[in-house]
Image (cartoon, rainbow, N blue to C red):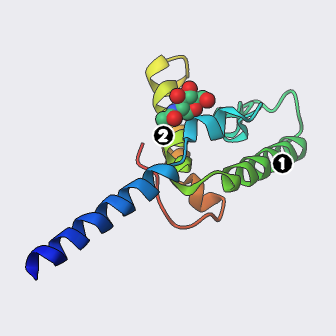
Amino acid sequence: MATRYAIVGILLVCLAASINAATQVNCTKQIQQQSQNYCHMWLSRFVDPQGTTLTKHQEQKQQDSLLQRCCKQLGTWDEICRCSDIRDFTRLQLRAGNWDAPRRERIVKEAPSLLKTCHLGSKMCQI
Ligand SMILES: *[C@@H]1O[C@H](CO)[C@@H](O)[C@H](O)[C@H]1NC(C)=O
């Protein structure tokens, strides 16, 4: 009797595993299909400290629309792909070392809470 249950149990585990494999999401594929990654653009946006090129109002408008596009795009990806893309991008930028301190500080602050900022749940992404 116990053996029979064990066999049924093993079969169920195998079935679950194969279903899981078949539905596994390829995040790389899903994300690289997009010609633009608006969240990467958002996280690496340049904020002109002097405000010489745009008025504050113009700059605000531009940033709002970029964030909107980022959030919209982020929402189309599978949940499991969202944080991994944000994390990979952030790590890459920090490692590359091309950014000045204010930009680095900004991404470190903004990237973990981007899902929250986008109203896509309350999950914080580990960077
Ligand atoms: C995901 O998709 C990419 C690009 O199409 C491909 O190179 C990669 O091998 C795929 N990865 C898996 C685990 O299927």
Give the quadrant of the N terminus.
bottom left
With 95 as the anchor, is 61 left or right in this view? right
Residue behind mark 1? 65
Residue toward you, 119 or 31: 31
Q: Give the structural element (helix, strand or loop) at label 2.
A: helix
Residue shown at the point (54%, 47%) measured from the top left: 25
Mark 2 closeness class: few <14, some 14–19, many ≥20 residues within 10 Å: some
Mark 2 or mark 1: name the one nearer the start of the chain.
1
Residue behind mark 2? 87
Residue toward you, 51 or 26: 26
Q: Is residue 92 above or below residue 77?
A: above
Quarter of the rendered structure image containing ligand 1: top right
Query: Which amino acid, by three-letter code, is at mark 2?
Result: Arg
Instruction: Where is residue 74? Give x, y as percent.
Output: 67, 50
* 3D distance between C-alphas at marks 2 and 1: 22 Å
Q: Taking the image as drawn, is residue 4 in sight?
A: yes
* Foreground tag (2 vs 1): 2
Q: Give the structural element (helix, strand or loop) at label 1.
A: helix
- Residue lying furthest bottom in this view? 1
